[in-house]
Image (tube, grey):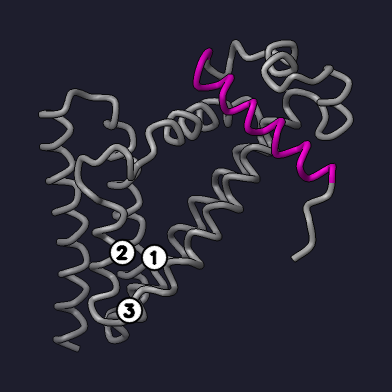
Amino acid sequence: MPRPSLKESRREEILDAFERCILRDGLPTCSLEDLATEANMKRSILRHYIGNRDDIILALAKRRRDRFKREWQQLDKLPEKDRVYQLLNLFFAGSDESYYELEQIIVNDALFAEAKRLPELAQQITAMLEDFVDHFSAELQRAFPKAPKQQCVSAAHGIQANYLLLEAIIPLEFSTKKQYFHHLKRAAKLQVDYLASLHREA
């Protein structure tokens, strides 16, 4: 396996430092000067390897989308039996914050907030949301081939909406969060159960 190039390793170092800045200070206040200090690099190095601040934001969003794609590829290794329900268990894993990677959720939320200002970022986030729906609806159609395709797509949208809400409530106090986790997972399962019933009745 070839070693990563200097450019690739530098870009990773810059994006890692950018995530740390976002977690510490928030994205709106994270300047190129702050990032250069965090990355222990000159501003000119940041510009050479990625570009200006907006270019770095876009590069971070692309890295996260690429990571998301790799995670879906890993999920392909799940066994066939009750596969969709296993996916639900992974996405709605209860109140275990380590699974949801609270820090990653904070970075995601920061990128979502910047999407209104950066149309290209909005396109990347939209594409990532569409990737989720495409993957999950394909899994639903695979599990319930007799269910109408459009019902599978709508169910995938509903499950995604539940998952995004679940991420949004991560910072809430434990008792409130636990209650929401339970109902959001149950609502997602009800959508899958409905497709299973359509498949059986067809």
Mark whose residue sits in front, 3 or 1: 3
On the rendered structure, is 97 left or right of 112? left
Badge 3 amino acid: Pro
Give the CA distance from mark 1 to mark 2. Answer: 9 Å
Could you tell which of marks 2 and 3 lies nearer the N-terminus? 3
Residue 79 is tagged as 3
Badge 1 amino acid: Phe
- Helix, strand or loop under label 2: helix
Residue 89 drawn above or below residue 179: below
Name the residue rendered at 70%, 39% in the picture.
12
Comparing 179 with 118, the one in front is: 179
Q: Which stretch appears magenta? A: 6-25
Residue neighbourhood size for the residue with mark 2, other residues' Cα within 10 Å, grouped as few (<14), some (14–19), many (≥20) = some
Badge 2 amino acid: Leu
Q: Quadrant of residue 46?
A: top right
Give the CA distance from mark 2 to mark 3. Answer: 11 Å
Residue 87 is tagged as 2
On the rendered structure, is 44 left or right of 163? right
Give the CA distance from mark 3 to mark 1. Answer: 16 Å
x then y, percent, for residue 16: 63, 32
